Image: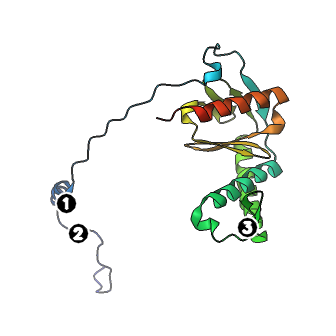
Amino acid sequence: MFNFLHPKPVVSRRPVAEHAIKQSARRTALPEVLIVKAPQRELPALAAAAAGAGAIEFSVVYRRREYLSFVQAHVRTRIGTDPSLRAERRHWEDGLPTLSLMERCVIGAIGSLMFAYKRRLMPRCDFRIDAQGIRRQSARGGLHLIWDEVQAVHRYPAGYLITISKGVMPLPRRCMTTNQHAKLAQWLQDWERLPTG
C-alpha cells in the first residue's frame, strides 16, 4: 500500500460539494418543448362501423423459413432505398439488389438465432385488426397499437411487415383467409391515405 508503484486514485480528493457547484454552474437551460398528442384517427372505410364489426382475427405460429424470407426481403429493400449502399450494387432483380452468398449466409445465421429467441418468447401470437388498430396477444402479454403508431408497412411475398417504434411485426399471408387478406389490404391502403401530423 505504501509502495511507490501503487496506482494513483482515479477520483479527485476535492470535496463533493465543490464538484456539484461546478457541475450546476455549467448546465444550460433547455428550451421549452410542447408535446401535443394527436387525436386517435380511425380508418375512413370503417369510421362509421362499430368497434367490433368486421375485425380480422387470426393466429400465427411463425416458421423459420418464413421469418428468414421477411428478413432477407427487408434487407434487400433497405439496401435498395439507401443511396450510399445502392451505388455499390451491380446485380438487381425485380427492382431490388440481389444478395451475395456471404450476405445470405450471415442473414441466415443471425436470422436463425433471432428466430429461435423470439419463438421461445412468443411461440404463438393472436392478432385482431380493426378500425381502431392492431392488437397482438402472446405469451409475453398484449400489445395494442392505434393506426397512428404504425410507421410503415412493407409488402413482401411472405406477407406484410408492420414497422412500429418498438420494432417490426410480421403478418404472414398464409395465416389469413382470402377475405381477411383482401380486407387487410384495403385497410392498409386507407392507412396510407391518412394525413400525417
What residue is drawn where x is 25% and y is 47%? 30
For residue 136, say whether it is visible: no
What mark, if any, has residue 12 been given in the picture? 2
The alpha-carbon separation of the residues under discs 2 and 1 comes to 9 Å
Q: CA distance from mark 3 to mark 1?
A: 51 Å
User: Pointer 3: what residue?
Assistant: 103
- The vertical placement of 3 against 197, above or below, is below
Q: Earlier in the sequence, mark 3 or mark 1?
A: 1
Question: Which secondary structure, mark 1?
Answer: helix
Residue on which disc 1 sits: 19
Expressed as whole percent of the image width and height from the top left, the position of residue 176 reads 81, 32
Q: Which dot, 2 or 1, sits closer to the camera?
A: 1
Residue 55 % position (x, y): 71, 21
Q: Are marks 2 and 3 in contact (CB under 8 Å)?
A: no
| Residue 26 higher or lower than 2, as above or below | above
At label 2, counting other C-alpha atoms closer than 10 Å, the crowd grade (few under 14, some 14-19, many 20 or more) is: few
User: As shown in the figure, which amino acid type bears the numbered disc 1?
Assistant: His
